[in-house]
Image (cartoon, rainbow, N blue to C red):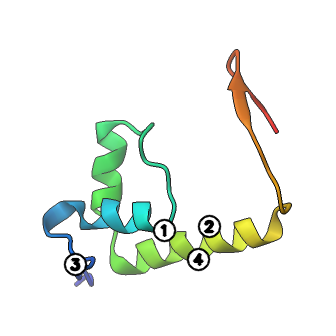
Amino acid sequence: MTDRTEAPGTAGPDRALAALAAAGFDLSGLTEEQHAVLRALTDQELALLADLKGRLEEAGPEVQGHAEVAGGALF
């Protein structure tokens, strides 16, 4: 059994996407297939992703910029 509680103000399968967006994840560039994978995440998996994102941001430089130019990433 998985724990799939609803994100506040969100009903149905998009609750996971709403929770990730609220945590600061940019989901705009993902495919529908990738959205489907994210919709299937359990609450524990969502919490882990949010925790990892926070820890990575804390470990990064205070100011970090990036851009994609000709298929390559510039930091």
Asked whether the beta carbons under mark 2 and mark 1 sit within 8 Å of each other, the answer is yes
Local packing at callout 1 (Cα closer than 10 Å; few below 14, some 14-19, many 20+) is some
Residue under label 4: 51
- Which kind of residue does numbered mark 3 sit on? Glu
Q: Mark 4 vs mark 3: which is more N-terminal?
A: 3
Asked whether the beta carbons under mark 3 and mark 1 sit within 8 Å of each other, the answer is no
Q: In the rendering, which numbered label is found on residue 59?
A: none
Asked whether the beta carbons under mark 2 and mark 4 sit within 8 Å of each other, the answer is yes
Identify the residue at the far front of this view. Answer: 63
Q: Percent position (x, y) of residue 67?
A: 71, 32
Residue under label 3: 6
Local packing at callout 4 (Cα closer than 10 Å; few below 14, some 14-19, many 20+) is few
- Which kind of residue does numbered mark 4 sit on? Asp
Measured Cα–Cα span from mark 2 to mark 4: 5 Å
Q: Which residue is drawn at 33% across and 59% down?
A: 17
Asked whether the beta carbons under mark 3 and mark 2 sit within 8 Å of each other, the answer is no
Residue under label 2: 53
The kind of secondary structure element at disc 4 is helix
Measured Cα–Cα span from mark 2 to mark 1: 9 Å
Q: In the rendering, which numbered label is found on residue 23?
A: 1
Asked whether the beta carbons under mark 4 and mark 3 sit within 8 Å of each other, the answer is no
- Which kind of residue does numbered mark 1 sit on? Ala
In the image, 65 versus 13, the foreground residue is 65
The kind of secondary structure element at disc 2 is helix
Q: Mark 3 vs mark 2: which is more N-terminal?
A: 3
Q: Which quadrant, please, contains the N terminus?
A: bottom left
Local packing at callout 3 (Cα closer than 10 Å; few below 14, some 14-19, many 20+) is some
